[in-house]
Amino acid sequence: MRRTLLAPLALAAVLVGTQPASAANEPRAQPASAANEPRAQPASATTAPTVPGWEPAPSAPWDVGAGVRCDFPVHGEPVVDEVEQRVLSTHPDGSVRRVAYRGDLVVRVTNTATGASHDADVSGSAVVEHRRDGSQFWAVRGPVLVGVGEGLGSLPRGLYVVDGVFTMDIAADGFKDVRLVHGTTDDLCARID
């Protein structure tokens, strides 16, 4: 597993460990999340010891239907999950404003129509800023998992491992604008078709 240090630029909030409101049925990019998949501890995952100020941020299995990300239905399940989060700041009402994510994460992505699968290493780090309007800004040092809906991103509809140094601005309506400073995208739909 690749262990990536937090980028000095805070990886604003999405891809790895949190789920934007618009992605209720989506996997996390986390960075996590990626980037944008639900987080909950699966029984098969292991969690690294917590360092003071950091707490586990486990990922939940997820499913998306045919045509949502890929032309076929997809299931994602963490097979390694050592992601931790640390709240860096809060809004005046106490809700999270900025949070950092780090740790190893490997997600098995499966085409549920054929059984073809790929284990995606999405062990990037990110700092995510949660804005009051429901939008998020991510500063990422990848790789992270990013799901994009039809017409809802600067990348075509799909499911990607985005690796490198980049930002992701997620609008309140779910539009994902991925800006690579240096990096690559790996189309997971093509890998499991």
Image (cartoon, rainbow, N blue to C red):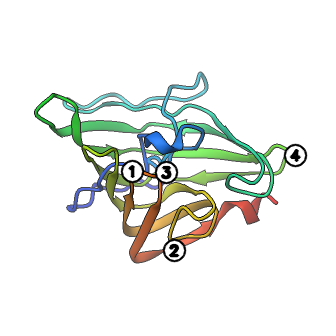
Whichever of labels 2 and 4 marks the residue nearer the N terminus, that label is 4
Q: Residue furthest right?
A: 114
Count neighbours of disc 3 (C-alpha within 10 A) and say few if under 14, some if 14 to 19, many if 20 or more: many
**Of the image marks 3 and 2, the number of the one nearer the N terminus:** 3
Q: CA distance from mark 3 to mark 4?
A: 23 Å
Which of discs 1 and 2 lies nearer the camera? The answer is: 1
Relative side of 95 to 29, left or right: left
Task: Indicate the amino acid at tag 4.
Answer: Ala
Residue on which the image places disc 1: 172
Residue labelled with disc 2: 184
- Dividing the picture into quadrants, the one containing residue 25 is top right
Q: Which circle marks residue 29 in the picture?
A: 3
Residue 63 versus residue 180 in the image, above or below = above
First of labels 3, 1 by sequence position: 3
At label 2, counting other C-alpha atoms closer than 10 Å, the crowd grade (few under 14, some 14-19, many 20 or more) is some
Determine the residue located farthest toward the left in the rendered image: 92
Q: Position of residue 23 (x, y in %)?
A: 52, 43
Residue lying at 61% horizontally and 69% vertically, measured from the top left:
156
For this rendering, which residue is in front, 189 or 82?
A: 189
Label 1, label 2: how many angstroms apart (C-alpha)? 26 Å
Q: Residue 110: x percent and y percent?
A: 75, 46
Helix, strand or loop at label 2? It is strand
Residue drawn at (68%, 60%) of the image:
188
- State the residue at coordinates (80%, 52%): 72
Say what secondary structure mark 1 lies in: loop
Q: Which label number is shown at residue 113?
A: 4
Label 4 SS: loop
